Image: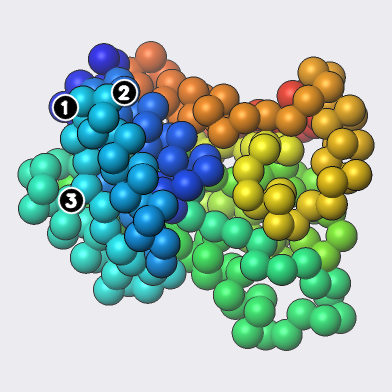
Amino acid sequence: MRLKNKVAIVTGGSRDIGRAVSLQLAAQGAKIVINYLSNVDNANETLNQIKAQGGEAIIVKGDVTKSADVAQLVEESRKAFGDQIDILVNVAGGMVARKPTLELDEDFWDTVMNLNLKSVYLASKAVIPYMTSGGSIINLSSLAGRDGGGPGASAYAAAKGGVMTYTRSLAKELGPKNIRVNAVLPGMIATTFHDTFSKPEVRVNVANATLLKREGQASEVADLIVYLASDESSYITGTNIDINGGLNFS
């Protein structure tokens, strides 16, 4: 129980990587605030799984691209579990659609940037006042942030690159308070993201290009995030850690 009695907010915590993170943080003793945008059934399923394993959690609906919703998310955490927030995992994000640059309009660009980058800024800013020494922020970037992504992913890749840089900047700001900030950069992980945006033959080719010859699992990303949330990683901050089966060594 490495995280016993810690309080963790997980944005986008109701499905896929977010669900795996919520479950594994809870299994280590953390009290979980599961943020979701619209699918309450997914959120309740994650909540029920945590309770079934003896954990504590609440679900909070909210659009983390909006400051008022993020403020409400933090307020619900405080009501349920007290004023201290020990862990923030910024999972919420997405590609929205694949569009080459000439088909990108300004509204689409802003939507992708807000979902993937502004959300990290808003959630971090709202949580930091309630974090004390030993706190940990973990952001979800992507291999796309390193290599530019696949066809039609320029806006998404740019946003995830921004997450990497913001992670470093925030680590510098918060280091003197002993609050650590890191990011994880998943490659091809078997989630609904790739069910939606990646063709089956592309997934097979990418999996075969990894050194381990397979896709990753959401639980494997969650394992890394639990480590970064725990005191076992107490001297790690400002890093962007790849988890891609050896597909990229950057």
Up-down relation of residue 135 to residue 45 (above or below): above
Within 10 Å of disc 3 (Cα), the crowding (few <14, some 14-19, many 20+) is many
Q: Which residue is mark 3?
A: 77
In this picture, residue 43 sits left or right of residue 239 = left
Determine the residue positioned at 38% across, 56% down.
41
Secondary structure beneath disc 1?
A: loop
Precedes in sequence: disc 3 or disc 2? 2
Tell me where residue 81 sits by quadrant. top left
Q: CA distance from mark 1 to mark 2?
A: 11 Å
Is residue 181 something one can see in this rendering? Answer: no
Q: CA distance from mark 3 to mark 2?
A: 19 Å
Precedes in sequence: disc 1 or disc 2? 1
Q: Which residue is mark 1?
A: 5
Tell me where residue 50 sits by quadrant. top left
In this picture, residue 87 sits left or right of residue 152 = left
Task: Where is residue 189? Give x, y as percent.
Answer: 67, 37
Up-down relation of residue 29 to residue 11 (above or below): above
Q: Which residue is mark 2?
A: 27
